[in-house]
Image: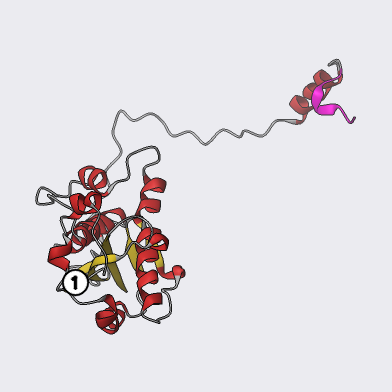
Amino acid sequence: MREIIFDTETTGFDPRTGDRLVEIGCIELVDRRETGITFHGYFNPERDMPAGAEAIHGLSIQFLSDKPLFASRVDELMEFLGDAPLVAHNAAFDFGFVNAELARAGRPALDMARMCCTVQMARKLHPGAKHSLDALCTRYGIDRSHRVKHGALLDAELLAHLYIEMTGGRQIGLGLAATPAAGPAITVVSAAPRADAPPFREPRPHMASTAERARHAEFVAGLNQPLWLDTV
C-alpha cells in the first residue's frame, strides 16, 4: 500500500483571509516503509511574510521571492500524490491550504476522504496527553535534535517515523518463515508412574441427587416471598 506523509509551511493560519502556502514536503511510504522518494517545494506566496510565521519556519520573503508559484509545479505535485492516502499532523490545516492553492490554480480539491490525521490517531491512543509533533516524538523515542525550526520536509520525515511507530512500529512486515527450518528430532518418552504417587480416583459426580433436590425445593418453599419467585 502506497501512502504519502506530508507537511506544509504557510504565511499564517487561515487561507480564507489571504494566508498562503510557502513550502510542502512529501515522503512516500510503501507498506509502511520509506522508499526514499520525496517531493519538496518552496513557493512564492506573492505577499509579505508576517514576523510571527517567519519566526516559526525561518522562511523570509527575500528567500521566497525567486521561488516558483504553486501553479507552476501543481502538475508535478499531483502526479507525485497520485491517489494515495495522505497523512498529515493536524491534517485539516494542511488540506485547507493545499486545496486553497489548488482552487487558485483552477484544479479540483483533494478529496477529504483521503485524509489521515495523526493528531486524531494520537488522541485515541493517548487520551489526555500532549499531541504536538515534538511531544509525540519524545513519547516514541524519535530523535528530533536536528529540528531547530519547522520545515516541511523535515517535519514530514519525523511524521513518517512517528506514523510508522503509531501503526505498529518496526514489527510491521516481520513474518514467520513459510517453512520452518528442520530441527533435530525429539523423542517423547512417557514417564513411569512414581512409586509414592497417590492412588487414582474416578472423578466425583457433581449432579445433585433426587433426595438433595427434594430437600432444596422444601427449603425454598419455606422462604418468605423470595425475589426470584416474584412474578409482579
Question: Magenta segment range?
Answer: 225-232
The answer to whether residue 177 is visible is no
SS at badge 1: strand
Looking at the rendered structure, the kind of residue marked 1 is His
In the orientation shown, which residue stands out farthest toward the right?
232
Quickly name the residue at label 1: 40
- Front residue of this view, candidates 25 and 141: 25
Residue 226 among those drawn in magenta: yes
- Front residue of this view, candidates 154 and 24: 24
Residue 91 among those drawn in magenta: no
Q: Position of residue 109 (x, y in %)?
A: 42, 75
- Rendered residue at 44%/34% (across/down): 200
The answer to whether 70 is drawn above or below residue 50 in the figure is below
Q: Position of residue 52 (x, y in %)?
A: 24, 49
Q: Position of residue 169 (x, y in %)?
A: 25, 56
The answer to whether residue 150 is visible is yes
- Front residue of this view, candidates 75 and 192: 75
- Rendered residue at 13%/64% (across/down): 62
